[in-house]
Amino acid sequence: MDRGLRRSIFMSYLIGAPIGLFVVFATILIPPFLGAGMFTIALLAVYGLPTVGLVLAFLVSLWIGGKIAYKNIVKGTSLLLTSLKYSTIVNLIIWTVFCLVLVLTFEKEKALILFPAIVAFFVCTILTTFSIGLLISYTIKKTYEKAKMSV
């Protein structure tokens, strides 16, 4: 594996993992602090196991996303399009795993239970394209340019 690709994957983990894991845990832990402990219990009862799948898939998807972002940067793809591709693939992987676990664990009301996850996919993809995905893509681009100049 080429050094630039390794650095890109590392940047994807370095920036994406702490932020993404913070968001997942904050989503679970903030309601009890606001006095909505029963909401958290209900949330975990329905989405607890799928959330575990989401977190594991997230860790894998950061590697894949870093690889895709690097290849796009090397090809000269614009930063915004690279960010969109990065965010789309990461969110597609994690929300697909989340939905698969939901489908496999619930027998009734699947459409109702899947609806929030489908909405979350679109919302997260849009938000991360213009925030974390853009930051990661920018960092990968700067790392690539620096490595290219030193050669």
Image (spheres, rainbow, N blue to C red):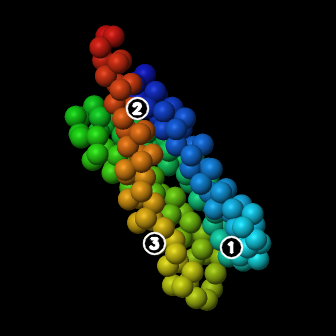
C-alpha span from label 1 to label 2: 35 Å
C-alpha span from label 1 to label 3: 16 Å
Residue placed most toward the observer, 63 or 144: 144
Please name the residue that numbered disc 3 is placed on: 119
Q: Quadrant of residue 78?
A: top left
The three-letter amino acid code for the residue at tag 2 is Thr
- Can you name the residue that lies furthest to the front here? 34
State the residue at coordinates (37%, 51%).
Answer: 129
State the residue at coordinates (39%, 24%).
Answer: 143
Query: Where residue 40 sits: x, y (%)?
Result: 72, 71
Query: Where residue 97 sits: x, y (%)?
Result: 54, 63
Q: Is residue 31 left or right of residue 103?
A: right
Residue placed most toward the observer, 28 or 77: 28
State the residue at coordinates (30%, 17%).
Answer: 148
Quadrant for the C terminus in the image: top left
Q: Earlier in the sequence, mark 1 or mark 2?
A: 1
Please name the residue that numbered disc 2 is placed on: 139
Query: Where residue 4 sits: x, y (%)?
Result: 40, 25
Please name the residue that numbered disc 1 is placed on: 43
Dots 1, 2 in contact, CB < 8 A: no
Q: Quadrant of residue 55?
A: bottom right
| Position above or below: 105 against 65 | below
The three-letter amino acid code for the residue at tag 1 is Leu
C-alpha span from label 2 to label 3: 28 Å
Which SS class for mark 2? helix
Q: Is residue 13 left or right of residue 51?
A: left
